[in-house]
Image (spheres, helix red, strand yellow):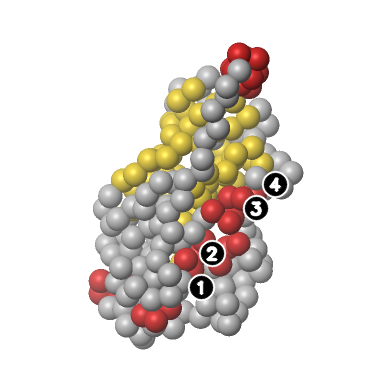
Amino acid sequence: MRTTTSLFAGFMLCTAVLAATASWADDDKDTYKLIITNLTPGQPIAPVMAATHRPGLSFFTAGEAPMPELANLAEAGDGQPMAAKLITLPGYGDAQVGAVGTGPGQTTTMTITARHGTDHLSLGAMLGNTNDAFIALRDVELPKGRQSVTYMADAYDAGTETNDESCSTVPGPACGGVALSPGDSGEGFVFIHNGIHGIGGLNAAVYDWRNPAAQIEIMRTHN
């Protein structure tokens, strides 16, 4: 299975009453642009899953067992199941998945909204030429006014798949292997990833990295 790219569909309002309601709702939310820059030399970053929420929340906790949806995000590059899960949980305002991935040295953008009280952001995306590495920001504050803020994102290990670096289980362009490994429970907890060591089919000189793995600039663009 290859890295999955997904877009949330938009809904068109057909009546004047619904349009007026939507306009009122838009006044109660802010829009933010996320500018993602890949800082690794050989790791493509899958489309980013981002969510706005009240302070104190995140989609994972380092040192603890991962949500099942984290396997999709970190092993398959598919953030859609995580976004769909988070938007159903109390305290979350919006959850989106970017349209495209981000190659080494490249920059991509996506947008997300936040309503009153959901002024923090968490995001994650797979490093494609790995078993289950993902970049992440957890519970960072969104900028106020027209200012922007920049954060550095480290790479974590989801703990859902063993880091055998085998091309049979690495879905990125270096290997093209299968994505999910449901029969492999991995380490069982989330931790800082320790990189590529050349023990399988991946050349460490090409695909290893050091944290931070990405730079995330957040710009407020509406309200």
Instruction: Using the rendered image of the protein, determine whether residue 188 is visible from the camera's viewpoint.
Output: yes
- Is residue 201 depicted above or below 132 in this figure? below
Give the x, y percent position of residue 175: 32, 75
Instruction: Work out whether 143 lies above or below 61.
Output: above
Q: Count neighbours of disc 4 (C-alpha within 10 A) and say few if under 14, some if 14 to 19, many if 20 or more.
A: few
Would residue 193 appear left or right of 117 to someone viewing this image? left
Q: Earlier in the sequence, mark 3 or mark 1?
A: 3
Task: Give whichever of discs 3 and 2 has the lower sequence position.
Answer: 2
Q: Which labelled disc corresponds to residue 72?
A: 2
Disc 1 marks which amino acid? Leu
N-terminal of the pair, mark 1 or mark 2, is 2
Q: Is residue 79 left or right of residue 2?
A: right
Give yes or no for contact between labels 3 and 4 (Cβ–Cβ under 8 Å): yes
Q: Residue at x 64, y 19 (%)?
A: 18
* Alpha carbon distance from label 3 to label 2: 12 Å
Q: Mark 1 touching mark 2, by CB under 8 A? A: yes
Separation (CA) of disc 1 from disc 4? 24 Å
Image x and y of residue 110, in percent: 42, 40
Q: Secondary structure at mark 4?
A: loop
Task: Assess disc 3: are there few (<14), some (14-19) or many (≥20) residues with their C-alpha within 10 Å of its C-alpha.
Answer: few
Disc marking residue 180:
1
Give the x, y percent position of residue 181.
Answer: 52, 77
Q: Secondary structure at mark 2?
A: helix
Residue 85: assigned label: 3
Determine whether, in the image, residue 209 is placed left or right of residue 218.
left
> What is the CA distance from the residue labelled 2 to the residue labelled 4?
18 Å
Residue found 54% across the figure and 53% down from its top: 80
Question: Residue at (45%, 25%) from the top-left corner?
Answer: 221
Secondary structure under tag 3 reads: helix
Label 3 to label 4, Cα distance in Å?
A: 6 Å
Q: Residues within 10 Å of mark 2 (few under 14, many from 20)?
A: many
Q: Which residue is mark 4?
A: 88
